[in-house]
Amino acid sequence: MILVLLAMAAASATPLARHQYPAAIKAITAMLQHQDQPFWYARLGTARARLGHYSDALGAFSMGLGSPFYERQGWRDHANVLRGLGQCEEAATLRASFEATLAVPDSTLLWLDIAEDWLACGNHDRAFEAIAQAEARSEGHPDVHAVLSDVYRDQGHWVEANYHLDQALLVANPRSFRPVLSSVEHRMQVGDLVGAEEQLRFIIVGHMRDTRLFLARSAWFMLAGRFDEAQVLAERGPWADHEDVRVLCRRHAVHQGVGDVHAAAQVRRQAQQRLGYAPLCPAVTWSEAKFDRLVPMGSSSTEHR
């Protein structure tokens, strides 16, 4: 029996390590029939989180707290889920609790993730505070400049946004994901769709499940008038059943933008069924030059909970 359980454990761990999340969920669920242990719940939470099944992921993480896998890496996925559901304060608090642990080799990146938590909910003051913490740990880091650029651009402070974006691109690897993503978003805001498309090509590989990349790509398709492609992207896996509020709002905005009222209503019904509420999504004005917000989301971490 012990050998059987060991074989099952290995079979459960392998798909997750290989990013085969549906297979991982199936194998881990089977393992839990024999070993109802927090370690497996934490793994199950991570697999579900990376598929965008946030409601189920939260339930699994609640059973996996404190387990070795959770303490090593599951907490990051847990925080990402909280951010995606609009619970930004909870996400930031969870991340901060892991500073000075072996799970955080670079506290600069940790504090930038915290800044992203606050920025996702539109809290610029708290985002600036987190960026200051990151900068204190690594002055001149390209990702620090990239996130600063995002915050300033989001506030309409274009001189500061341009300066920090230039600094980020100057010191970063030409294909570094975070600075290039900031540049893509910036170019779309000013109407440089050709430049944005060129940079998108650099960062698609290896980041296809990144939420902000989905937001950037769907926005680019809409701004370029490639409406059919925007709808295809919005309705294919993993985004078709993703529970991140920003993804749901973007899918809704895409369908509204092309006049598909039925599909837009279906997204709201899906949100109601899976989250228990339909998020209040800001209106997105698509034009050739810009749109209101690249990442629409609620303004409060407690709204609609």
Image (cartoon, rainbow, N blue to C red):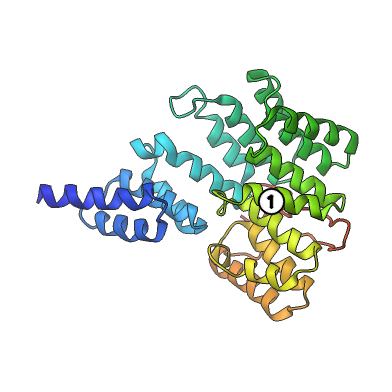
Q: Residue at x 85, y 35 (%)?
A: 162
User: 97 or 48: which is nearer to us?
Assistant: 48
**Residue 65 located left or right of residue 126:** left
Q: Residue at x 70, y 46 (%)?
A: 121
**Residue 281 located left or right of residue 21:** right
Q: Name the residue under label 1.
A: 200
User: 199 or 296: which is nearer to us?
Assistant: 199
Give the amino acid type for the residue marked by disc 1 in the picture: Leu
**Quadrant in the rendering for residue 123:** top right
Q: Where is residue 265 in the image (x, y as percent from the top left)?
A: 68, 76
Determine if residue 135 is in view.
Answer: yes
User: 13 or 288: which is nearer to us?
Assistant: 288
**Residue 183 located left or right of residue 285:** left
Task: Judge whether 213 appears above or below 264 on screen.
Answer: above
**Quadrant in the rendering for residue 22:** bottom left
**Quadrant in the rendering for residue 214:** bottom right
